[in-house]
Image (tube, rainbow, N blue to C red):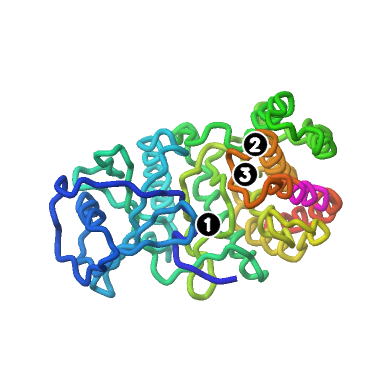
Amino acid sequence: MGGCPVGGAAFIYCWGLVNFLCLPIFGRLMNQSTSTDIRIHNLIAAFNIDADIASVTAFGSGHINDTYRIKNSDPNGIDYLLQRVNHHVFKDVPILMQNLLYVTEHLKQKLSEIPGSDLEKEVITIVETRDGKPYFRDDDGNYWRVFHFLKDTRSYDQVTTGQQAYEGGKAFGRFQALLADMEPGLIKDTIPDFHNIESRLAKFEKAVEADKVGRLHKILPEIEFVRQRADEMGEILRLGRTGELPLRIVHNDTKFNNVLLDRYDHAQCVIDLDTVMPGYVAYDFGDSIRTIANTASEDEENVKLIGINISLFESYTKGYLKEAVLFLTEPELNSLLKGVLLLPYAQTVRFLTDYLEGDHYYKIHNPDHNLQRTRAQLTLVKKLEENRDRLSHIINHTWRLYKP
């Protein structure tokens, strides 16, 4: 495990070109690295960046990410992150950026009413272009944006302590609480049907019927597993349609590395807001548990190593409910365990669908990698089912502790 500052694994962006002559040179480019393309410096000039630039360096460790840290020559000044939005994943970037403006403005307004809040540290800040837009489109049709870089923060890909799990729960619980009174209709879907299990299952059944690459005979037990649980896993959607579960603005991608912690490992800011869309609170709770409480990796080959870390589950639940208890309805509370089962099940369906279709979506390291992932997530669902009563008791006991 290791910590890294904001932005490391949380974004999907790639290289684009900027016309060298289309933008004016700005400020003083100090100590410019020979490895930094001058086009990036010219691109930066499109944004309202008030700084003498000491360096612009590639930032992050993702395989397809392309993010740049813009370092201020003044050590007390603001640093920035420059990123290119992947418009193949996010089809309507203007809508995406409008969502981010609505969400960040709402968060800052709510935090401004809470004594002791630091809006610049607790919410990402979008830097506008010189013509007042939240993004810049270059001559090649690529979309770029800039955020304030949050110094002295770290993120983790894995949770190893109860304190980390508790802070992650607090961060996402508070994020939902601050957005609980926001009108869901203001935010548009950036990836339609992102957590819609009915849609995922329909695509899965089409893949089974087509058997495009002749793998059906190898996965009959996995197909049966998916089909046996299909009706149960649609319950959150059905409760939402009847109005029993309120539609809210939720994060939709609550991996632990989407929480920034300060130097003392206290939660500071939730990042990677591109998938913030209308949905149900159980989605966020379930996705966090899928990654935090699993004792093995998402694609663990030896399924005997897969189990549930009850202690981390309890710590995350305490942090989450401490913040969320004031807005959650009782049906939403009862839906949390449904989300814990749904999210790894949905990931099972997605991996198995990709395997049937010939591995066109997820990057693989061997021909059966998606099948390996499928079996790992399938095993996680089974382990969660085996611990259902214990997990339910933890949720309800914690709720009673915090409920006014």
Q: Which residues are magenta?
A: 375-383
Q: Is residue 333 visible?
A: no
Nearest-to-viewer mark from 3 and 1: 1
Marks 3 and 1, Cα distance to the nearest angstrom?
16 Å
Decide: few, some or many residues near mark 3? Use Cα within 10 Å; few <14, some 14-19, many ≥20: many
Marks 3 and 2, Cα distance to the nearest angstrom?
33 Å
Looking at marks 3 and 1 on the same chain, the residue that comes earlier in the sequence is marked by 1
Judging by the rendered image, the residue that carries numbered circle 2 is 358
Instruction: Name which residue lies at 70% across and 24% down.
Output: 210
Judging by the rendered image, the residue that carries numbered circle 3 is 281
Rendered-image quadrant of the C terminus: bottom right
Q: Amino acid at mark 1?
A: Asn
Question: In terms of secondary structure, where does tag 3 sit?
Answer: helix
Question: In terms of secondary structure, where does tag 1 sit?
Answer: helix
Q: Amino acid at mark 2?
A: Gly
Residue 94 sits in quarter? top left
* Discs 1, 2 touching: Cβ within 8 Å: no
Residue 245 sits in quarter? top right
* Discs 3, 1 touching: Cβ within 8 Å: no
Instruction: Name which residue lies at 48% across and 40% down.
Output: 182
Looking at marks 3 and 2 on the same chain, the residue that comes earlier in the sequence is marked by 3
Judging by the rendered image, the residue that carries numbered circle 1 is 258
